[in-house]
Image: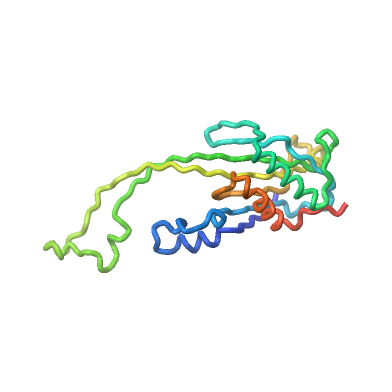
Amino acid sequence: MKKIWILMGASLVIASLISSCRKDPIDNLSEEETRIYVTNYDKDVDFGTYSTFSIVDSVAVVTNNGDYSKELTNYDQQLINTVKQSFIDRGYKLVDKTASPDLAVNLTRIDNTYSSVVIGGPGYWSGWPGYWDPGYWGYPGWGYYFPPYYGVFNYKERSVAIDLVDLKNAAKEGDNQLTTIWNAMLRGQGVWNSNNIESMVKAVFDQSTYLETTL
């Protein structure tokens, strides 16, 4: 599967801010500016040759701790409806999963929690020109020693994945695998906020202009 990755939203902003001298460059970003939308598709696939689709009736929730479940919260129902309508707007016909749809749409909420230990040394400023030379204190030619320290931090990352699976050609492959031909990943603050679903889904479809049937 040949892949093309497209990043929108805050990626360029974040890259430029990280290169600045501020210690916390993303502190001043709005919630919307932190969100990044990534789409991945098989460029050898002609999306116009598919006409029907079906979508899951709930949303899978997975974590990096190995936990998983299927849920249908108000958020999940709104996500399903919005993605469903987006495919309909591109000309695809919604059918039941028992009606042999050409395409299947999977929806997943991903909830990852990370813990890390950071071992630190000299402050980043210690080697800068103009920093206090030990000679000032009567020890010319000496250097500074900074005892190592460590800190523990935890952070959570929540994201949403939309996967488009080729059912039309599944039997032709002969390897008992379903091929995902398009994927969208929604990341950043507020991704699990119902108020942002419409704009986020619109963003990934706007950058996927090839996703349209001609049948």
* Relative vertical location of residue 189 with respect to residue 125 in this rendering, above or below: above
Q: Say which residue appears at 62% left-offset and 50% top-offset.
A: 196
Please give left or right for residue 212 compared with residue 14 in the image. right
- Identify the residue at image location x=49%, y=39%: 113
Total numbered circles = 0
Residue 134: give x, y in percent of width and height: 17, 62
Left or right: where 21 falls relative to 79: left
Residue drawn at (83%, 39%) of the image: 95
Q: In this view, does 136 lie above or below 98?
A: below
Front residue of 95 and 169: 95
Say whether residue 130 is left or right of residue 106.
Answer: left
Q: Residue furthest toward the left?
A: 138
Residue 201 image position (x, y, % from top left): 68, 51
Query: In percent of the image, x 67 and y 55: which residue is there?
Result: 203
Q: Measured along the vertical axis of the image, is residue 108 above or below residue 39?
A: above
Measuring from the top left, give residue 197's x and y in whole percent.
65, 48
| Image location of residue 208, percent across then percent down | 72, 56
> What color scheme is it?
rainbow
